[in-house]
Image (cartoon, grey):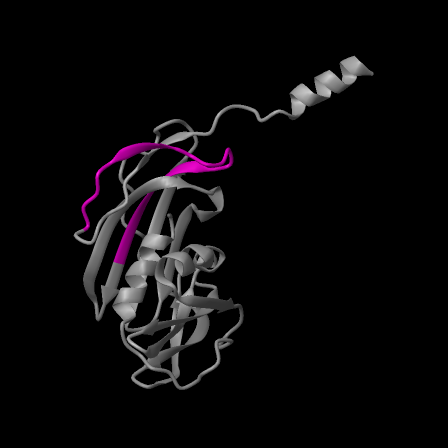
């Protein structure tokens, strides 16, 4: 019995160390200093992300991010508020310092048939055609200078499942739902959209 317990104890011990990955988190100017970091969890992988934000058809943000992260955050995702859209492409790998290469730009996407409400001016009554793998409707609410800012639009599952990172970084309250126009139309104060989008982008793989 003692021998069985010993064998079982050894078998249940953590298998191997956590990965060591490159970390590169851009500052306000988009530059970053690449360092090496030991991942906090054995389930984490090394990742390289490309974050691109657009507004009115113009590219406003194009960042490269490297970090440890959970495998469920690997792949392509986007968050679309109508006036602005941020897309993220995260490539993951599972060996020490394997995320040395930069991630490519996210793929171009087309409408997928989904619809969500979006905000324009002081109302959120317009509808927005979701694209690519945006299969959720999203509502983001934040306070800025005593004013409540509400943004609505389409989002990928990865964005919604990672909303805890977004909330920690931006202080925004994020809610997601699945189903056409499930983020009901309400009066909102619009503005600061690009600021929130940028925070969401960086938060995705933090």
Residue 100 visible to an observer of this rendering: no
Relative height, residue 103 to residue 18 (above, below): below
Relative height, residue 40 to residue 57 (above, below): above
Instruction: Name the image quarter holding residue 33.
Output: top left
**Where is residue 26 drawn, in percent x and y?**
24, 47
Relative height, residue 203 to residue 119 (above, below): above
Instruction: Name the image quarter holding residue 145.
Output: bottom left
Bounds of the magenta segment: 30-52
Relative height, residue 114 to residue 201 (above, below): below
Residue 199 visible to an observer of this rendering: yes
**Where is residue 57 drawn, in percent x and y?**
21, 67
**Where is residue 87 drawn, in percent x and y?**
32, 57
Residue that sits furthest to the top in the current view: 3
Q: Quarter of the image for the N terminus: give it.
A: top right
Question: Does the segment drawn in magenta span residue 5?
Answer: no
**Where is residue 182 drawn, in percent x and y?**
51, 76
Residue that sits furthest to the front in the current view: 146
Q: Residue at x 49, y 56 (%)?
A: 161
Left or right: where 61 falls relative to 204: left
């Amino acid at each position: 019995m003692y021998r069985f317990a010993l064998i079982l104890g050894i078998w249940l011990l953590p298998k191997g160390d956590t990965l060591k990955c490159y970390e590169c988190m851009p500052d306000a100017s988009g530059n970053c200093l690449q360092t090496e970091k030991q991942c906090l969890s054995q389930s984490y992988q090394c990742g390289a992300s490309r974050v691109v934000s657009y507004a009115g058809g113009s590219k406003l943000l194009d960042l490269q991010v490297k970090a440890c992260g959970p495998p469920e955050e690997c792949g392509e995702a986007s968050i679309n508020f109508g006036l602005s859209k941020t897309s993220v492409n995260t490539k993951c790998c599972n060996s020490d310092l394997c995320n040395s290469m930069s991630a490519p730009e996210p793929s171009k996407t087309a409408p997928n048939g989904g619809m969500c409400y979006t905000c324009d001016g002081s109302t959120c009554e317009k509808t927005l055609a979701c694209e690519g793998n945006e299969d959720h409707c999203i509502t983001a609410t934040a306070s800025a200078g005593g004013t409540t800012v509400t943004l609505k639009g389409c989002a990928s599952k990865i964005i919604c499942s990672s909303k805890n990172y977004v909330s920690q970084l931006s202080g925004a309250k994020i809610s997601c739902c699945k189903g056409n126009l499930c983020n009901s139309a309400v009066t909102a104060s619009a503005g600061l959209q690009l600021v929130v989008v940028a925070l969401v982008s960086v938060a995705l793989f933090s």
